[in-house]
Image (cartoon, rainbow, N blue to C red):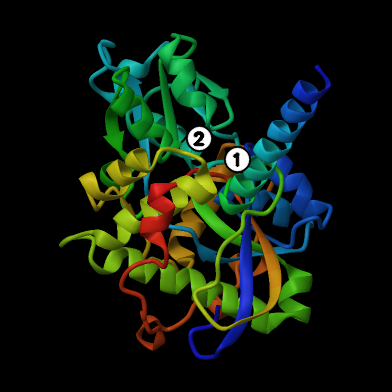
Amino acid sequence: MKSKLILGAAAALVGLFFLNRYLNETPRYMESSPSTGKPVGGEVREKFVVGFLPVT
Amino acid sequence: MSQHSTSGTQFQAQKFTDFPSMKEALIARKLDATFMIAPLAMKLASDGVPVKIVYLGHRDGTALVVGTDAPIHAFEDLRGKVVAIPSRFSNQNIFLHRMMKQLGMPADSMTIKELPPPEHPSSLAVGAIDAYIIGEPHAAKAEIEGYGRVLLQMRDAWPNFISCVLVVRQELIDERRPLVDELVRGIAASGEWLDEDRLTTAQHRRDAAIVTGKMFYNQPPELLEYVLTKDATRVSYTELMPPKKDFDEIMDLAVELEILPKRIPFEDYVDTSFAPDLETIELKLDRLPDVEKVAAQ
């Protein structure tokens, strides 16, 4: 029983590790926070937020 | 990023779902620059908020949408109907009144209802409204999903229609002029790039649909591609210097409709000094970086 619990916990930890890695690598929009735009090239001197509403 | 240097500002987009929240953020200086509907910017300036319109966001790109099978085939058929607008302080609202006046219809011919833009298509779908007038992609959404059809494109009814404009706080203009210049040049360059091949392959717009849909709008890229490429004149991203003649007309209509209390001089709410000479803008990109990677996500 104890070994099953240890195995289950280990599997959960491995799963969480991969989930965390996947989420960090996947760009996704977060409401109320600035989106992340990747600069075309060069050095980012500063960041500046511009508001928009997704409508033309 | 500036096109003429290896360093520059990374402009990040903060999404809002309604204009009142955006307005409050600008007033409270939680935000120093934003795209917003033109009459709302004029109203803020009229109320003494130190803001200026420095560039347009686009031209046209708004449509009046009705139910697919609704017995509405001309503007006059909207008599007695409920029509949604994004805000009282929008050119969509001004347009409805302009049309009613032109057609000799009383101003109360239709019930005009303010709704946040994302709620327009769903409200039409459930029959809560009979029509809506809004910027893309919310007009195309009803078309694609099969419950709406375009009664008229603003391009045809009010050519070079102005909806959203870039508004910045006066403090930013006074204290950080190079940053505003960089922002406006970047928007001008993006617009040139989007329109550059729109009548041929429209590859630039296809790339933009993928990146914008997945990373910024949180909307299906297919919907944005439909808007940007099915009829490439549906929305334009060039000729974005704020035109005095058009704003004077908007101002007159807004005062007449009591959206604004009185006329204010163009120079009090617009600063055209940032609008660049488009001949000086270089378009270095062919495809957007990592577009295929973004598409696969």
Q: Position of residue B277 (x, y in %)?
A: 42, 84
Q: Are marks 1 and 2 on the same chain?
A: yes
Residue tagged by mark 1? B89
**Taking A5 as reference, is B1 left or right?**
left
In depth, the one of B68 and B47 nearer the eye is B68
**Taking B28 as reference, is B163 left or right?**
left
Looking at numbered disc 1 in the image, what kind of residue is underneath it?
A: Phe
Q: For the image shown, how many numbered marks are present on the structure? A: 2
Name the residue rendered at 54%, 41% in the picture: B90
Instruction: Please indicate, yes or no, whether residue B109 appears anywhere in the rendered image.
Output: no
Name the residue rendered at 60%, 40% in the picture: B89
Looking at numbered disc 2 in the image, what kind of residue is underneath it?
A: Asn
Q: CA distance from mark 1 to mark 2?
A: 7 Å
Q: Quadrant of the N terminus of chain B?
A: bottom right
Q: Position of residue B249 (x, y in %)?
A: 47, 53
- Tag of residue B93: 2
In depth, the one of B259 and B201 nearer the eye is B201
Q: Quadrant of residue A12?
A: top right
Q: Quadrant of residue B220?
A: top left
Name the residue rendered at 54%, 34% in the picture: B86
Q: Are marks 1 and 2 in contact (CB under 8 Å)?
A: yes
Q: Position of residue B135 (x, y in %)?
A: 44, 40
- Tag of residue B39: none
Return the chain for callout 1.
B
**Taking B152 as reference, is B50 left or right?**
right
Looking at the rendered structure, the secondary structure element under dot 2 is helix
**Taking B124 as reference, is B119 left or right?**
right
- Identify whether B107 is placed above or below B163: above
Q: Position of residue B272 (x, y in %)?
A: 55, 75
Name the residue rendered at 43%, 17% in the picture: B124
